Amino acid sequence: MRLAELSERSGVSTATIKYYLREGLLPPGHRVTATTAEYDAGHLRRLRLVRALIQVGGVPVATAREVLGHVDDESLGRTVRLGAALWALPHAPEPDEDDPAVVAARAEVDRLLESLGWETARELAPLSPVHRSLVVAVATLRRLGYLWDAELMAPYGELMHQVARRQLDFMETHASPTEQVELAVASAVLFEPVLRALHRLAQEEESARRYGIE
Amino acid sequence: MRLAELSERSGVSTATIKYYLREGLLPPGHRVTATTAEYDAGHLRRLRLVRALIQVGGVPVATAREVLGHVDDESLGRTVRLGAALWALPHAPEPDEDDPAVVAARAEVDRLLESLGWETARELAPLSPVHRSLVVAVATLRRLGYLWDAELMAPYGELMHQVARRQLDFMETHASPTEQVELAVASAVLFEPVLRALHRLAQEEESARRYGIE
DNA sequence: CTTCCTGGGATAGCGAGACTATCCAAGCAG
DNA sequence: CTGCTTGGATAGTCTCGCTATCCCAGGAAG
């Protein structure tokens, strides 16, 4: 198919597709003549993933390019590829280590990882942007006066661990090897809105059960 | 304290504080003379909440104003105030009901709510932006070929329900009446980054346990 | 062969959002 | 009175994600 048809089938304007091609989010089509290029089902699939990352995941274009670069790097193993995708996602800015809230948050997160027995997370802590994001988020809550500590967070950690185990079980049983990497990205980025929506719905439901709709 | 001190203590530039005052995110200070106004600890606290909403929660300024409007409306009950805050948050665009992925997603979400017994969520489904967000997210995953159905989502729903119950328990035992509304907003917006970070850390940990670091 | 039309590439512009820099007038301090 | 600070208003800046325009090289119709 040519650019016009790719646009038609994906619902993305030709101008935007050209933009993604320029930005390297989409590999160029096969050149047929000097003025025409041919696109295939792989381009369509990639284009849908790009749109999902940007629109549903809210991932900036530059970040999406980085994430997709890791997806395409077949020299990496599963964990690394998943990790690379996760690490490339937008992360919190460097925390100010002089801020007492940050110091306290870091201490609580460390205690949390210890109590959960997450050894890998502890080892990678100094490097991992995910770890840093957690510290920043906890520090923000503490600065507002909500003193989240390891004991409070541990049950949530256990619950999220259950979620992660389920996702990897699903991935192992349902995805072919070629699909696994893309599924890793989908899990990391696209499943989060589902989880967030479920969380908010559960909050509404539980609040209504306890206090009524008033 | 005056504007300069408020800026100093919050780490937010005076220009930005003036911007928030203009936008109605921060109530004006008490006018002392024609040229000076006095700010108090309440302003500092509100300013920190605003920054947290915008920077940590990624909430647009216009939306933050709306959310804070509900926080300040003392005529509302707990559930409504929590709901108002949740509903004001940025939500997915209207789904295209002609898209088969959207139709299928909506059917699966309805089945999910039925199997979970979330009656309130079912009643409010046609109105709730949260419900719509869930449909859009599931539809996006389906369009990419990941056929999430009610059976797959139910365990996540149960887990998120456990999270929500914990949060409301915490809110009931730890927050004074005046703090509860702000805590509702904090739960809705600021706790989500914590949950997301825990989720990603759990993914890394579980992936490393299963496949090693390679 | 020529003319018109289409597909594709490059460039510049647009609109929203979140600040940010500048200017200004009113005090109050010395 | 002079100069410095405070607060208010206005316009500018910067980034991001597109989007509209221009241009040229074919290929097809006459």
Image (spheres, coloured by chain):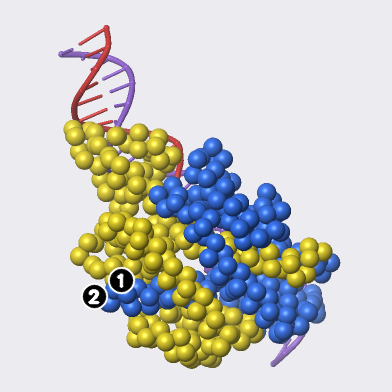
Chain colours: A yellow, B blue, C purple, D red
Residue A167 in the image: state x and y as whole percent.
42, 66
Which quarter of the rendering shows the N terminus of chain B? bottom right
Is B167 on the left or on the right of B146, as rendered?
right
Verify CB contact (< 8 Å) between mark 1 and mark 2: yes
Q: Residue furthest right?
A: B75
In the displayed structure, B132 sits above or below A195; it is above
What residue is drawn where x is 70% and y is 85%?
B174
**Residue nearest the viewer, comparing A52 with A78:** A78
Residue A114 position, x and y percent, is: 44, 90
Residue with the mark numbered 1: A79
Residue B167, image quadrant: bottom right
Residue D11 picture location, percent across and down? 58, 56
Q: SS for tag 1?
A: helix
Mark 2 packing: few (<14 Cα in 10 Å), some, or many (20+)? few
Dot 1, how many residues are within 10 Å of its Cα: few (below 14), some (14-19), or many (20+)?
Answer: many
Image quarter of the C terminus of chain B: bottom left
The amino acid type, in three-letter code, at marker 1 is: Thr
Q: Tell which subunit mark 1 falls on.
A: A
Residue at the location (34% across, 71% down)?
A83
* Residue placed under numbered mark 2 in the picture: B214
